[in-house]
Amino acid sequence: MILVTRRLPKPAIQLLRSHAPLCYHNSSRSLSRRELLRKIRRARGVVCLLTDRMDRQVIAAAEHLKIIANVAVGYDNIDVPYARSRGIIVTNTPGVLTDAVADLTWALILAVARRVVESDRFTRRGRFKGWDMELMLGTELKGKVLGLIGFGRIGQAVAQRAVGFGMSIQYYQRHPVEHSGRPVPLEDLLRTSDFVSIHLPLTPETHHLLDRKRLALLKRTAFLINTSRGPIVDEKALATALEHHRLAGAGLDVFEREPRIEPSLKKMDRLVLLPHIGSATVETRTAMAVKACESVLAFLRGETPPNLVDGTGGGRGVTGLL
Ligand code: NAD
């Protein structure tokens, strides 16, 4: 039996259903911890989401489990080393969400630079009394420096879009890549970028990578964008830095303790906050779910599924990291 922990787009579930008996949690709500522990006991495979914490206890409860197919490219919700030690393979869904997340990153860059959300609120409240030379002045993008922390699929797709805006690119990245952008040490990137955007996986190394000290390096005029994973930024330290105007603003799609958000962040106008919708287009969510189900089907056919995760780019499955 294959456990599907939450409602999936129809094409994905139809694909899986025609090939395997399912235990399908056809709901927009996550399984509770207790439900997950109970349902996974008989499963040979599981199609899960980043809201399912597949830690040691859950994996140990799954005596027959052979494959965990995560409907996400990040897999910090899964204890990959432990799964592998039990002979369980783990797959993710890279590639199909790259453009959607890069687009949303740009939606945030433009929104914070041009005060789009703040202006919308202002207009709706009836405060627009006519054109004004100084009304809602923002920041020009042309000629500015975009610093990308993490320069894999999504980071590079964000850089590609920056060409049209006339920005120059610098990036910080673990492995060198062939690109016209400038590779720089992290501290230099933070000191010299006008927009800093994070595109790293969440791992023990990247947890709180942007802590109080590193956030203090940002220019006072800089904007921070995060569409990767919340715990990469120390959210309390970010709130304090914003309160003291040590940076100009932020666009956040992800938070340290989702769905909870540091209360002071919600009060500041210079922020745009989104409910983790980086990959949320109909096309992309369908493609992600189909990709995860195809991995399970490949496994059931006795093949090695595509998109195996080796645990080096994420996956500590640590309680409290999600
Ligand atoms: P990727 O693997 O292609 O790119 C990540 C890059 O980070 C890699 O090039 C890797 O070398 C680099 N890296 C890893 N650890 C590093 C470290 N400690 N220091 C420096 N560089 C390091 O992944 P991707 O497809 O670009 O996705 C990036 C992340 O975006 C995912 O892991 C996921 O957490 C996040 N994401 C978020 C959403 C969302 O809904 N907001 C959607 C998709 C992906």
Image (spheres, rainbow, N blue to C red):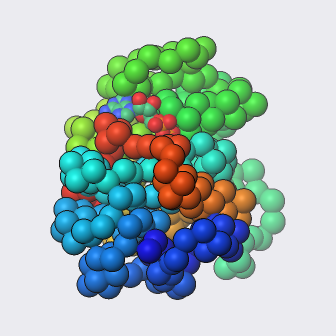
Name which residue lies at 44% across and 16% down: 176
Asked whether, in this view, residue 211 is left or right of residue 278, the answer is left
- Indicate left or right for 268 with 298 as reference: left
Residue 174 in the image: x percent, y percent?
A: 37, 25
- Residue 262 rendering spot, x and y as whole percentages: 32, 67
Residue shown at 29% from the left, 76% from the top: 41
Above or below, comparing residue 218 to residue 18 in the picture: above
Q: Closer to the camera, 5 or 224? A: 5
Q: Across the whole image, how many numbered discs are drawn on residues?
A: 0
Compared to 52, does 75 lie above or below?
Answer: above
Q: Judge from the rendering whether residue 18 lies leftward or rightward of residue 28; answer left or right.
A: right
Res. 263 visible in picture: yes
Query: Residue drawn 63% across and 35% down?
Result: 157
Q: Quadrant of the C terminus?
A: bottom left
Above or below, 70 against 19 in this view is above
Residue 276 in picture, x, y percent from top left: 50, 63
Which of these two is toward me, 243 or 177? Answer: 177
**Percent coordinates x, y for residue 226 in the rendering:** 46, 49
Mark yes or no: residue 236 visible.
Answer: no
Ligand 1 quadrant assignment = top left
Image quarter of residue 139: top right
Q: Is residue 26 above or below residue 153?
A: below
- Residue at far right of view: 130
Q: Residue at x 31, y 37 (%)?
A: 312
Q: Quadrant of the N terminus?
A: bottom left
**Corner quadrant of residue 235:** bottom left
